[in-house]
Amino acid sequence: MITKNQKLIPDTLMLEERAGHVLHAIIGMSDEDHQHIPFFAANLLEQPAYLTHGDWDYGSSHGRLIDALVLARHMSGEERGLDIEAKYRENFLGFFKDDGLSYRMKNPKAPWEPTANLIDQRAVILALTSWYMSTGDRKIKSVADKHVAALKRIAVKERDVWYYPASEYTVNGWPSNNAVQLRLAPDPAAFCGRLIMPLLKYHELTGNTDAFELCQYFAALIVQRSGVFNPDGSFNDALAYRSGHFHTRIGTLDALARFAWFTRDASLTHFVKKSYDWALTWSTAFGWTPGDMHDQAFEHETCSLVDLISTGIMLAQSGYTEYWAVVERFLRNHLTESQLLDLDWVVSLDHKDADDVGLKSFYNVAERARGAFAGYSAPNDFCCDKHGGRGHTSDLQTCCIGSGTRGLFMGWSNTMTENNGTVSVNFLLNRGSRWLDVSSHLPHEGKVVLDIHQNIPKLLLRIPDWAGYAKVMIQRELDGTAHTQSGSDPSMWVKQRFLDLGETRKGETITVTFPVSKRQTVEKAMGEEFVTQWRGDDVVHLSPEGTHHPFYNHRQIFDKAPMKMGQYRRLEQEYYW
């Protein structure tokens, strides 16, 4: 049914629509037979496919999914599954003990112990921050303040750095005093570095000084003492450093980039850029990353890609504008390609007779997983089963569902940004806002239409490097009067790749056109080559083709962008991370 607010818009990528799809999977992971604790992983290649629980079910999974629910609802306006979300939030708060930390619960069918895992705590403060940001609930702030105070209290403090000496904290303290005395500090990126990101945002929201102190001393630990990153920016691949695990390393770079921006520390930004550029040499131009530098190297985590997206955005905001193009390629390709929308190939049961409650379910897996993001993927396939790696392990993880949602949000919220009256359109993606609507005809046509909703003192529009400048044309219409400008005018360009459209007026329509590049590259992933056909920033063919659920080769291109009736989401107040 067409509503009065709908209009004809390009039927091209809309991140807010993808957020609506992932909501389905977030709710679908709930295990109604096990206190609505979400399943952690899924094996989709087995016949029948199944979902499994794990020791990540608690603070990590609940934290990731609550954060994702806040962001996905903000983007999409969807309200389905509120009853399941309430269960997630209730469970989540039940994992805290009096010491302020979030603990894993004992499962009578599983071997893990009820400890406060330090990796979980990052997801916990992430969720608490988004929860408080979206509601202003003082009770949640109280929980978060107590949690941050606990993170500070248990940290081992030296003159210039703080750290955690073990991966797990117990109700009786650290499991070994000797570990504290020997300053063992396992994997500082995983347990300390990544925590900076949500802690910094919580400090921004509330002014919490404990959160800022943790950021300050964890950043010093990573840069000055940890050895996580080598002097040339490469990742330390020693076994003690999780073989150079990409998700935790790039997640730490994202955290440091944010802290550098907040503290105006140019040297720290340079530190991040050096390692980020090294990480890009191990990734494909369309966004596939290794899992680590050794055994897990062949398995891409959506989490790692989202870290690349977030870090690239922070570097772009810090003045390295070339990274806007890098991030747009990631958004258009491996992030959205990794979202599971077609499940015809998945075999699942329509009954629960084979279920092992609390551990495994075969029931309705395909439908429950629709909208999820890949846990481990190959460059050309949703499912990874490489001879050089660990073989096929699993296809979905809750962490990647949460991260994928956050990746959509980071792209959506940074498609256009405003600073002191200047609005900048950074990604050429469909997006509405209180300032203007962006309608993108890419990759079919080199055409972007801007519909202005209010007077803007200065409007900037990023043009892809492959579009050149001489054939960029700008047509402006207002109150029946039209005039044309050309990208060949040198005074049109700022920041190397942005058109300066100057002052724009409410009711104005600006149509920008340019040629679309068609090219071929050879992308390398752990020694394997993939012949990649590009149309603009979109991959339209990849060879060799995947085996189980191939990526990319289903994409259709038309001479004119297909159109549909729809509407963009426009919010007066938006969340930012």
Image (tube, rainbow, N blue to C red):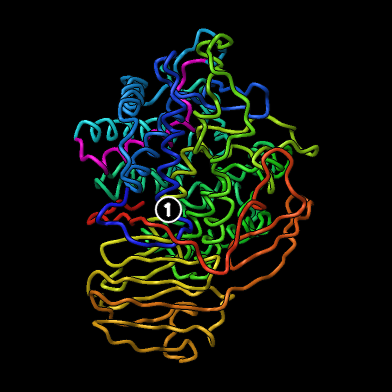
- Residue carrying label 1: 410
| Nearest the eye: 562 or 409 | 562
Q: Secondary structure at mark 1?
A: helix
Magenta-tinted stretch: 113-137
Inspect the image, locate mark 1, and give the three-letter code of the amino acid beneath it. Answer: Met
Neighbours of disc 1 within 10 Å: few (<14), some (14-19), many (20+): many
Main SS category, magenta section: helix
- Residue 290 rendering spot, x and y as whole percentages: 67, 46
The answer to if 114 sits in the magenta stretch is: yes
Write the residue at 63% across / 40% down.
Answer: 241
Residue 293's place in the image compared with 66, above or below, is below
- Whether residue 231 appears in this view of the structure is no
Residue 323's place in the image compared with 293, above or below, is below
- Residue 198 rendering spot, x and y as whole percentages: 38, 44
| Nearest the eye: 313 or 411 | 411
Write the residue at 67% across / 29% down.
Answer: 45
The answer to if 487 sits in the magenta stretch is: no
Q: Quadrant of residue 393?
A: top right
- Residue 304 rendering spot, x and y as whole percentages: 57, 46
Q: Quadrant of residue 374?
A: top right
Write the residue at 50% across / 83% down.
Answer: 472
In this picture, residue 145 sits left or right of residue 413: left
- Residue 17 rendering spot, x and y as whole percentages: 41, 48
| Nearest the eye: 25 or 556 | 556
